[in-house]
Amino acid sequence: MSASSTPLPGALADLAPLLDHYGYLAVALLVLLDNCGIPVPGQTILVLASVYAGSGHLDFAAVLLIAAGAATVGNGLGYLIGHTGGRAFVHRWGRYVLLTPARMERADGFFARHGGKVVAVARFVDGLRQYNGIIAGTTEMPWRRFAVFNLLGAVLWTAVWGTFGYVAGANIGTVYQTAIHYQLWFAIGLGLLVAAFLLRQVLRYRRRRRGGAHPGARGPPAERRGDTPNRPPQPGPR
């Protein structure tokens, strides 16, 4: 098995010997590890295997099925890691990374409202792909809801990058570099959106705190209206 006739860019060329020797097993292992918190080139091996399938050296349907299954299982393992040990880790070490109980509570609320969308699209962003399952488990996202969006995200991610590699074929070098370029801009844009959301939450939290501090300082309602509060009757002159 070899794709030496297809010019490969650096990252893909580095993985070619691994795929030559281990084939589908390399796809399954790297994609699984990449989706459960270990930063290995799972997305790159998926693209490379799809290029091989386009040149007839692997079966494209098998590549997609194996990658989707490995991505689903890997993210599920990440969820179990977060669900069983994430809370204890945050309570023990969270203060060293500025993850206070209040911030953890807000993260819980965010995942309760938007966790499905995060899990579904996280695979398209390096960093989120590796750790979204752990975060979902730590924030105690319901397993059934996580499982549905985990499978959906795995299928979408596999279909997009698998089809990309299969169609790119002999032009993979140029196309891959262009895709990485736009993926970087996508990641930057997503990062700015997340930062804006977090800033908005912080400002809202500060406004609530200031609003809660003022009413007591203005005194009881009866005194603010000028009413005479109830006092014991005073003895008159005799």
Image (tube, rainbow, N blue to C red):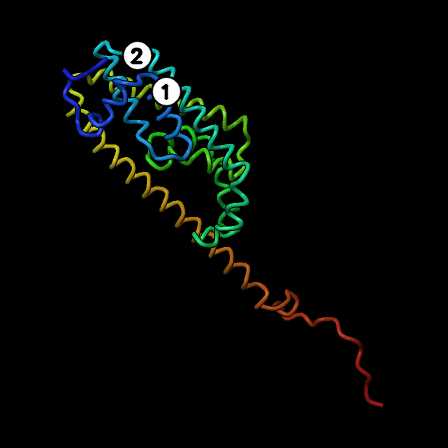
Which residue is under mark 2?
Answer: 60
**Residue 209: mark in rendering:** none
Residue 87: horizontal and vertical position, in percent? 54, 43
The residue under label 1 is 67
Measuring 53% from the left and 40% from the top, which residue is drawn there? 85
Q: Is residue 235 above or below residue 10?
A: below
Q: Disc 1 marks which amino acid?
A: Ala
Residue 182 coordinates in the image, percent (x, y): 23, 32
Q: What is the quadrant of residue 160 in the picture?
A: top left
- Image position of 10 (left or right of 69): left
In front: 18, or 127? 18
Farthest residue in the right direction? 238
Determine whether, in the image, residue 44 is placed left or right of residue 226.
left
| Placement of the N terminus among the 4 image quadrants | top left
Q: Quadrant of residue 42?
A: top left
Q: State the residue at coordinates (30%, 10%).
A: 59
Look at the image and tell me in which quarter the C terminus lies: bottom right
109 versus 6 height, above or below: below
Kind of residue at badge 2:
Phe
Rounded to the nearest angstrom, the CA distance separating label 2 from label 1 is: 11 Å
> What is the x, y in percent for residue 5?
14, 15
74 in relation to 159, above or below: below
Say what secondary structure mark 2 lies in: helix
Residue furthest out toward the bottom: 238
Callout 1 secondary element? helix
Q: Residues within 10 Å of mark 2 (few under 14, many from 20)?
A: many
